[in-house]
Image (spheres, rainbow, N blue to C red):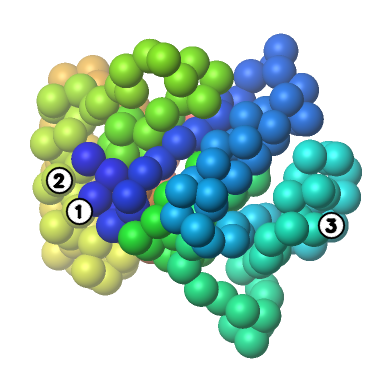
Amino acid sequence: MVSTISLARAAWVPDDPERDREAAAGLAVAWVRQQCAEQQSSGILVLKAFGVERQIPLLRSFAAEHTVITPGAPRSRGWRSGPVLAYAPDGTTLELAARLARGSSLAAVESAHRFPLRGWAHQLGAVDLSRPDERPEGLRPELAEAVDRLDLCTTNGFDDPFGKQQAQRILRTLQGAGVLDRDVILGALAARGASERAVRHLAKLINELDPQ
């Protein structure tokens, strides 16, 4: 299933108020280090901004061993593909992490207030690193079908009349069935490779139908 965005493997650490940042980071660091060893490659730490890693010892040590990249970093910094750890990504950071992890592995540590990853994980069949022995969850069939249809409308980021109308029709159908799950839909579409712009515009359409 992870082939949706050309990843070999995907994993995540769900946001949990009972799990501190060091423990969450540690789960992802251990997994990405293992991926690096298996692929004989160095890793990449993707952050929203430089300096975040200094607040968490395990991330700081990982950053010292591997490349650190943010969405604003110049490409001359050494952008390449390899096992990626995306820490507390928002939509832009997650898009960058997925691009850098193509053909390789990606672990994301969720920050639910920035970008909920449940739909992303379900779309990719990502391993929950807090429960690694459990089978990854997938999307409900009706949501999987809707995401497939929405994916066909993303050419112009839902910013053209046709794409917007088609998306609204699909979303209204989900709303009528009582399964308009905003976070799952947006995350799943991001996992399909939709741009941050497309995901942001779709979020606006969902909010117009179902204000929160």
Spatial CA distance of label 2 from label 1 is 5 Å
Identified at 78% across, 30% down, the residue is 22
Residue under label 1: 151
Q: 198 and 99: which one is in front?
A: 99
Q: Position of residue 148 (x, y in %)?
A: 14, 45
The secondary structure type at the circle numbered 3 is loop
Identified at 34% across, 60% down, the residue is 103
Under mark 1, the amino acid is Asp
* Displayed quadrant of residue 48: bottom right
Q: Which mark is residue 51?
A: 3
The answer to whether residue 114 is seen in the rendering is no
Under mark 3, the amino acid is Gly
Q: Position of residue 51 (x, y in %)?
A: 84, 57
Answer yes or no: do the residues labelled 2 and 1 have beta carbons within 8 Å? yes
Q: Position of residue 66 (x, y in %)?
A: 69, 61
Spatial CA distance of label 3 from label 2 is 38 Å
Spatial CA distance of label 3 from label 1 is 35 Å
Residue under label 2: 148
Under mark 2, the amino acid is Asp
Identified at 19% across, 49% down, the residue is 150
